[in-house]
């Protein structure tokens, strides 16, 4: 399975399987915006290194709810 196939399986295809493709499954206008920002381009990374990827931010419903501060300790969004 390619990276693109796996990504689609966990996003668009999963939303479709749950009859929810109009609500989520892609970052598009009008859809829920739940996503994370990471420090690694996992599409280009060495597969052995992906496990070291760090989450930098978490967004829920289009609002930032968590961010990793420079010191490495977690802080909640407002």
Image: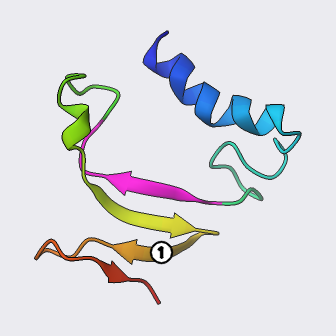
What's the residue at 63%, 37% (across, down)?
11
Q: Seen in the image, is 71 located left or right of residue 6?
A: left
Please name the residue that numbered disc 1 is placed on: 64
**Residue 35 in magenta stretch:** yes
What's the residue at 60%, 27% (across, down)?
8
Q: Seen in the image, is 78 located left or right of residue 55?
A: right
**Residue 74 in magenta stretch:** no
* Residue 67 position in % (x across, y down): 33, 73
* Residue 28 position in % (x across, y down): 68, 50
* Residue 39 position in % (x across, y down): 24, 50
Q: Secondary structure at mark 1?
A: strand
The image shows residue 59, relative to residue 78, as above or below, that is: above
Q: Which quadrant of the figure has residue 42?
A: top left
What's the residue at 29%, 37% (across, down)?
41
Q: Seen in the image, is 25 located left or right of residue 5?
A: right
Q: Which quadrant of the figure has residue 62?
A: bottom right
């Amino acid at each position: 399975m390619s990276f693109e196939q796996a990504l689609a399986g966990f996003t668009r295809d999963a939303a479709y399987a749950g009859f929810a493709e109009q609500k989520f499954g892609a970052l598009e206008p009008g859809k829920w915006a739940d996503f994370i920002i990471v420090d690694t381009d996992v599409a280009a990374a060495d597969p052995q290194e992906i496990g070291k990827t760090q989450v930098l931010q978490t967004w829920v419903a289009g609002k930032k709810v968590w961010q990793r501060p420079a010191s490495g300790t977690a802080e909640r969004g407002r």
